[in-house]
Amino acid sequence: MKTRNYGIDFLRMISMIMIVMLHTLGHGGILRSVSFLSVHYQIAWLLEVIAFGAVNTYAMISGFVSVDSHFKISNILILWLQVLFYGILINTVFFFLLPESRNTSGWIQALFPVTRKEYWYFTAYFCMFFFIPYFTVLLNNLSKKELTTLCLTILIMLCVLPTFAQDDIFQTSYGYSFLWLSSLYILGGY
């Protein structure tokens, strides 16, 4: 029987809170609405900086906890249904509360979240999900030295080189892609 790692569970909860904070600060318009260099500006940006790595942390936790799990196709179907449910629920709420926002594109995006790229994380995870069995084989069969070399290669290719090039040279969409999420999953699994 696998024992539960409460430290990882706590870190996952903290990451989720920080992700909500990122969305509130960014999508909620707080960062755009505060006066430049005011106290509120400094606090808002401090919170943004503190929470900035939360999505990456969450992705690495996924790799850490999933490396020994059994792959089940039903997991992605359940997740798809959850995304579908909340997408429809949110559109329904906006339909009644903000009649001026009524349009068909919101409903289409809610019904087809991957093909319409409604939620970048779900789209990237959906693609990555089908590679997880191969990542698991990789993580469970490479030697410690080979895994270390793989992780160092990932870090150099996806973090160091783009920093020096000051460009997204490997098309990771600056951390919003299947490739980036997969790399974090592998690093977490390591």
Image (cartoon, rainbow, N blue to C red):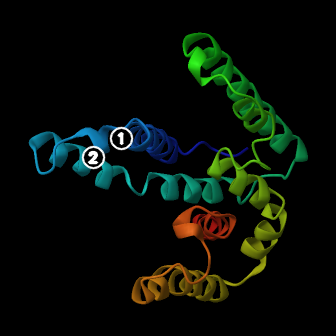
Above-or-below relation of 188 to 24: below
Q: Residue furthest front?
A: 100
Amino acid type indicated by mark 1: Leu
Question: Which circle marks residue 5 in the picture?
Answer: none
Indicate the amino acid at tag 2. Leu
Considering the numbered disc 1 on the image, is that residue within a helix, a strand or a loop? helix
CB contact under 8 Å: marks 1 and 2: yes
Q: Position of residue 83 (x, y in %)?
A: 72, 34
Q: Tell me which residue sits at (63%, 53%) in the image.
A: 62
Other residues around mark 2 within 10 Å, as few (<14) / some (14–19) / many (≥20): some
Q: Residue at label 2?
A: 47
Percent of width and height locating residue 14: 42, 41
Image quadrant in which the N terminus is located? top right
Vertical arrangement, residue 39 with respect to residue 177, above or below: above
Per the image, label 2 sits on a secondary structure element best described as: helix
Q: Please tell me whether residue 146 is drawn above or below residue 125 in the rendered image.
A: below
